[in-house]
Image (cartoon, coloured by chain):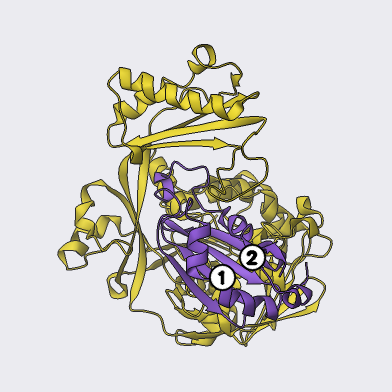
Chain colours: A purple, B yellow
Amino acid sequence: MPIVALSRIADARSGDKGEGSNVGVMARSDAAYAFLKSKLTTDAVRTHMQAINSGAVKRYESDSLRVLNFILADSLGGGGSASLKTDAQGKTHGLALLRMKLDVPADVLAATPE
Amino acid sequence: MARKDKVLVANGQGFWGDSLLGPIRLCREGPIDYLTLDYLAEVTMSILQKQRLREPSKGFATDFIKMIERTAPELVAKGIKVVANAGGVNPMACKDATIAALHKQGFKGVKIAVVEGDDIYGQLDALLAGGEELKNMDTGAPLSSVRKTVSSANVYLGAFPTAQALDQGAQIVITGRGTDPGLVLGPLIHEFGWKPGDYDLIAAGTIAGHIVECGAQCTGGNYTDWRAVKNMAMVGYPIIEASADGSFVVTKHAGTGGMVTRRSILHQLVYEMGDPKNYIGPDGTADFTSITMEEVGPDRVRITGAKGGPPTPTYKVSISYSDGWKALGQLTVSGPDALAKAKLCAEIVWKRLEYDGCTFAESEKLVEFVGANVCHAGIDVPNASEPSEVVLHIGVKGQDKAKIDRFGYELVPLVTSGPPGVTGFAGGRPHATEIIGFWPALMRKDKVTTKVSLFES
């Protein structure tokens, strides 16, 4: 199976939620969504983002929207005006997740627009 | 009153700091019935509160007044109605400044409504005494633990007071803290006569409001496939073409940049989202997963099927409190060996402070080497180990203001007493600024009274 970045099959946007952030991952095909639903687990996201997020990761699913929404509980260095970080609002966390490398089956790639 | 089939509700401002051109272009580039403007974020309430503490006639979004000055002739000539949460923590002062701006251009007789009731700061002690604990939603701690340092407390009001202001004939509605989607929902309630309890319709209006609340973020701004976005400089701001049955089309004016597609809207739908099946608002809950999106024409996406449910018995409350001090500074370090030299600079700062008896715990310090993969820390990215230059971003926080200020003295000296190639002191010596903490809480709705007042310019 080819190893590609998550960005090959999904879009993402992130923003702040209190002292954490959310990353909405939008699969670009039904096949990509089905694949991500099984592979893009909270553990996988937690490991990939461990230098950014020190809290728990929660996942919400929406089959009809082909969306997996991840809540990173502690990713802003305090949140609001208490943060000293450059990205105090988690604006770049979506792109950070899209850099994740995944072993994606060829048929999923074929079914998913670039 | 005869009801319209379709109502055009635009958003021209996604947050305070958004381009002034958004609302100006929406007034010029095509038809709209309503111009909604969102100026408030959790951080913004803190900033406005600091301003009001310094100067009692401030504490509202001054960009709104600039917007009124620029667009007044078109607003009046075309009868465009304006709904803005520009009131911040001082909506009456915002109204006065709005009237002054209209007078300056000779516009008299414009009806302006102010929605109040969100500000519960003055009632806090009575509320606490009456059994409202205003526990922190994230930590569970009672508000009494930080009560002495609380500087503002505002309820996220629903959209019905805004609709009531429009029912009374207001052309401009100024609110304080309400929900962002309520800026769109209010006009729809007014236009279509929706009632409390029309949960699917309220959900539709809430989802419409959420889609446009961040301005160009649903029309190609902050979009993953950014190369595909045409004419981003003149990106179109979003317009909801709403119908009484709760269905609506998301669109933008013809000839503007960006795009409205299922994919561009989805980007905004997930923004700051929690549980997509249960988006909680003061007037009802909305199920984002219930909608159907259909591309029905160029830059036209029709959304139908929104389902909602009853609201909770509580309002969300946004409370800010003083939580210590911080200072942040930065300097640019050129190559060769940019990263190694920037690391040395940070070490030097901490050692010189330590020599002077000024130490900070690890949790009170932050050092970032911008350019060497700060945003995506821990993730393998190309070219992060040998950047040609980096920005040292260094800061401290804590309760002792004098210590925070002392830190600020040790950055600039690195130009002459650090490694070579240190430059770019933007903003000079950093000073301590107050940290305003955000305290989210819930309180019973029956403890809040809203008030709508009508004025004329």
What is the quadrant of residue B449 in the picture?
Answer: bottom left
| Marks 2 and 1, how far apart at CA | 9 Å
Residue furthest to the left in view is B129
- Position of the N terminus of chain B, as image quadrant, is bottom right
Q: How crowded is mark 1: few (under 14 residues within 10 Å), some or many (20 or more)?
A: some
Query: Can you identify the residue that label 1 sits on?
Result: A40
Front one among B243 and B232: B232
**Could you tell me which residue is drawn at 75 percent across and 78 percent down?**
A107
Front one among B427 and B414: B414
Residue furthest to the top in view is B416
First in sequence, mark 2 or 1: give its number: 1
Task: Residue B10: tell me if it is visible.
Answer: no
Which kind of residue does numbered mark 1 sit on?
Leu
The chain that hosts pointer 1 is A
Find residue B70 and report its horizontal and vertical position in percent: 68, 47
The chain that hosts pointer 2 is A
C-beta proximity under 8 Å, tags 2 and 1: yes
Task: From this view, report whether residue B263 is shown above or below residue B143.
Answer: below
**Could you tell me which residue is drawn at 39 percent across and 46 percent down?**
B49
